Image: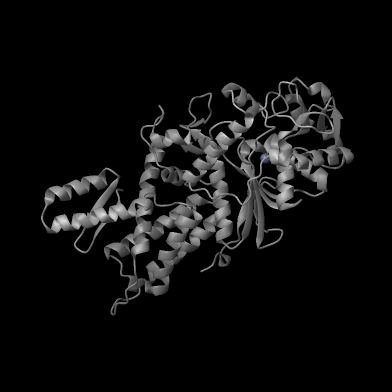
Amino acid sequence: MTAQTFQPLKIFNTLTRKKDVFVPIAPPYVGMYVCGPTVYNNVHLGNIRTFLSFDILFRYLTHIGYKVRYVRNITDVGHLVGDGDEGEDKIGKMAKLQKLEPMEIVQRYTNDFHDVTAVFNLLSPSIEPTATGHLIEQIEAVESLIEKGVAYESNGSVYFDINKYQAGGNEYGKLSGRIIEDLLNETRDLDGQAEKRNPLDFALWKKASPEHIMQWESPWGKGFPGWHLECTCMSAKYLGKQFDIHGGGMDLKFPHHECEIAQGKSLTGEEPVRYWMHTNMLTVNGQKMSKSLGNSFLPAELFSGNHELLEQAYSPMTVRFFMLQSQYRSTLDFSNDALKAAHKGYKKLANGLRLAKLLTYTHEDGVSADDAKKADIEKSIEGFYNAMNDDLNTAVAFANLFNMLKYINMLNTGQLKSAALGEAVFTSLKEQFVVFFEDVLGLKEELAEGHAILDGMLKLYREFKLSQNYEKVDEIRSYFKNQGLVIRDTKTRIDWAYEE
Ligand SMILES: [Zn+2]
């Protein structure tokens, strides 16, 4: 069974404001760029949701046969407090606070980011470029924009000229749906505004004040690149002047992505991105997750349960499963009840995975085909693909996966004979379940590394049971129980499973 027989893959494109059929520029290759973290503090859960959403896209595109180049940058300079052209550099500020070199801050939080993404089983991108590693490209881009007349130097800084850009027939605000007049009304009186011809002009290069730690030589004196420029330069360098997919959190739509479009289009004359994708935010008990409200979690707090809003610890795969239960464009509300339910759901599927791997097909004479079940299994597999093809609707994909789980459990208890499904349907149920769980949804069995120990303990359990040493049998049962596991001791088989 192949994905090609199903609905075509559609992606909600922020640029067109509708679900567009995904047609890559040069199939089977797909170029995908996602704005990575600014590495000045520990990555929080809202960020993880964004990177997880694009992990699913990366996995799914690969699964259906595309060769994906996934670029996700590390912002290690130029992102200012307040996300605009004013204020301190986020990394420079943290370096001062912690009395460390900026690159120590960058290294520390890049390591944290990598550790956390690995715990959540996110695949590494194909390329992970840094802003400081692409200063030459950024300076060249600024020179080119000045040459093209859409940027100007002012007091050692260089700004992008919104009026010139608009005069060239372009529309600043088309991605985010912002209207220039409204934006002008919202503009505050800020330092550096006097240097700009239009308050909406944004910095491509900023003159560094003497106390600014990170600064480089440029044709305009010592300074540093504007935040929006790195993504334009690095995406063009690794994916070309026009590429397939650009993603990020919805808070990046404006100004960051709007500015990327303006820069890219001015540099090459082409629309830089075909499909813009934005993930929705994470809320906590209905409120926006934010540090100032005290309701934002670090992954470590979640895994330890060490936070006043958490009733217990939750494992990385429980959280991954929880996040994927909603489609990436809907808000996701984080609550203890929802997480506890996710914990149960994840364990049911994890048990299904173990069983699916153990199931074997048995030919049996006299077992008649169960056509209704066969059709329902095929419908679930098709339903899974169609859900993923419908703008990565993981919520519906899970409903289909749970329907497949039902048949795996029936096969395990003997309620359903494999012969009633026929070898082809049986095999596709078993294999697709594993592929959907592990490869597409990126879930894994959390105790997979400990299987050898558990299997050894189970062997002892059998021996103690045979020798009627029930005290030891109980000890082994509680050993499993302490890890959230249960020994399933039936007439036909002794096995362990996640306690559901
Ligand atoms: Zn970016």
Residue nearest the viewer, comparing 488 with 204: 204
Query: Is residue 459 or residue 348 the one in the foreground?
Result: 459
Judge from the rendering whether residue 43 lies leftward or rightward of residue 416; answer left or right: right
Residue 330 visible within the image: no
Q: Is residue 486 visible?
A: yes
163 above or below 341?
above
User: How did the renderer colour the structure?
Assistant: one colour
Residue nearer the viewer, 14 or 223: 223
Give ligand 1's quarter of the image: top right
Q: Position of residue 213 (x, y in %)?
A: 69, 26
Q: Quadrant of residue 77?
A: top right
* Residue 345 image position (x, y, % from top left): 38, 48
Q: Position of residue 368 (x, y in %)?
A: 32, 76
Tell me: 152 left or right of 264. right
Give me the residue at 43% from left, 52% from top: 444
Residue 101 percent location from the top left of the image: 62, 28
Q: Is residue 351 above or below residue 333?
A: below
How many marks the image carries: the answer is: 0
Looking at the image, which residue sits at the far bottom? 365
Q: Can you name the residue that lies furthest to the left here?
A: 468
Query: Can you tell which quarter of the image residue 280 is in?
Result: top right
User: What residue sits 86% from the left and 32% below the top?
Assistant: 152
**Residue 194 vs residue 99: left or right?**
right
Q: In the image shown, does 146 or 359 lie closer to the viewer? A: 146
